[in-house]
Image: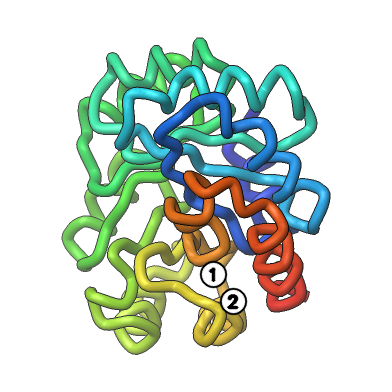
């Protein structure tokens, strides 16, 4: 997948569930709850040992889902995630070594930034689509507007503190491609296999994106 086609897909979906899975056996029912209720995408974070297997299971069961790997910190995790079936990588910060590794392999990566110096580092690496993280803790919409103003080609994916109360405000901003969110896929809901509640929250989130 090219970076351009990734941005187009993300812009269509608008709200990307960021999921932490402790048990890979729960990955497929979770993915189906998301896809069948309006959010056919997932960023599976490498915060647990089940991440790679979860990605592989989702890829096999739901091949049309837009599937990314989050909390990618090094090339080893890039290889694990890509081999499992992830189409793109997301990282909390901007590590030039990891970015260049992905670029050399033709894998889209969306690294995290929250200040002008990091934006310029990303632009220097040829990236004009970055993650604004942690969004709310870094100043929220006011900071995001300040970052977008001087960098006219910059596009952002705010993540961190996004919820049903503020997602629409973020998405209303020019050059905000999409938002990452966890509120519809809280670990408590996943581990409790509360698929009905996840489905309800997913439908509500999909409505916010319209």
Q: Which mark is residue 176?
A: 1
Q: List x then y, in percent, for residue 127.
A: 41, 45
Where disc 2 sits, the SS reads helix
156 left or right of 14 in image? left
Depth order, front residue of 145/10: 10
Spatial CA span between label 1 and label 2: 6 Å
Q: How many marks?
A: 2
The answer to which quarter of the image holds residue 120 is bottom left
Depth order, front residue of 127/142: 142
| Residue positioned 35% across, 32% down in the render | 46
The residue where tag 2 is placed is: 171
The answer to which quarter of the image holds residue 103 is top left
Q: List x then y, in percent, for residue 183.
A: 50, 66
For the N terminus, the quadrant is top right
Label 1 close to label 2 by CB (< 8 Å): yes
Looking at marks 1 and 2 on the same chain, the residue that comes earlier in the sequence is marked by 2
Instruction: Answer whether residue 155 is visible to the viewer in this image.
Output: no
Q: List x then y, in percent, for residue 79.
A: 39, 13
Depth order, front residue of 100/62: 62
For the C terminus, the quadrant is bottom right
139 left or right of 142 in image? left
Does residue 60 lie above or below 191 as drawn? above
């Amino acid at each position: 997948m090219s970076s351009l086609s990734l941005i187009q897909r993300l812009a269509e979906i608008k709200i990307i569930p960021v999921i932490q899975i402790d048990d890979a056996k729960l990955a497929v029912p979770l993915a189906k709850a998301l896809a069948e209720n309006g959010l056919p995408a997932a960023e599976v974070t490498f915060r647990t040992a089940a991440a790679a297997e979860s990605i592989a299971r989702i890829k096999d069961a739901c091949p049309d889902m837009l599937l990314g790997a989050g909390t990618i910190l090094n090339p080893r995790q890039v290889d694990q995630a890509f081999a499992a079936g992830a189409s793109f990588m997301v990282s909390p910060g901007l590590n030039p070594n990891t970015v260049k590794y992905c670029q050399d392999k033709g894998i889209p990566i969306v690294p995290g930034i929250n200040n002008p110096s990091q934006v310029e580092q990303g632009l220097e690496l040829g990236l004009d689509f970055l993650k604004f993280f942690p969004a709310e803790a870094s100043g929220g919409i006011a900071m995001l507007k300040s970052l977008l103003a001087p960098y006219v080609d910059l596009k952002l994916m705010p993540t961190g503190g996004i919820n049903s109360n503020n997602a629409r405000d973020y998405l209303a901003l020019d050059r905000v491609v999409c938002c990452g969110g966890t509120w519809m896929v809280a670990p408590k809901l996943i581990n409790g296999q509360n698929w009905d509640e996840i489905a309800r929250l997913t439908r509500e989130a999909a409505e916010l994106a319209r």
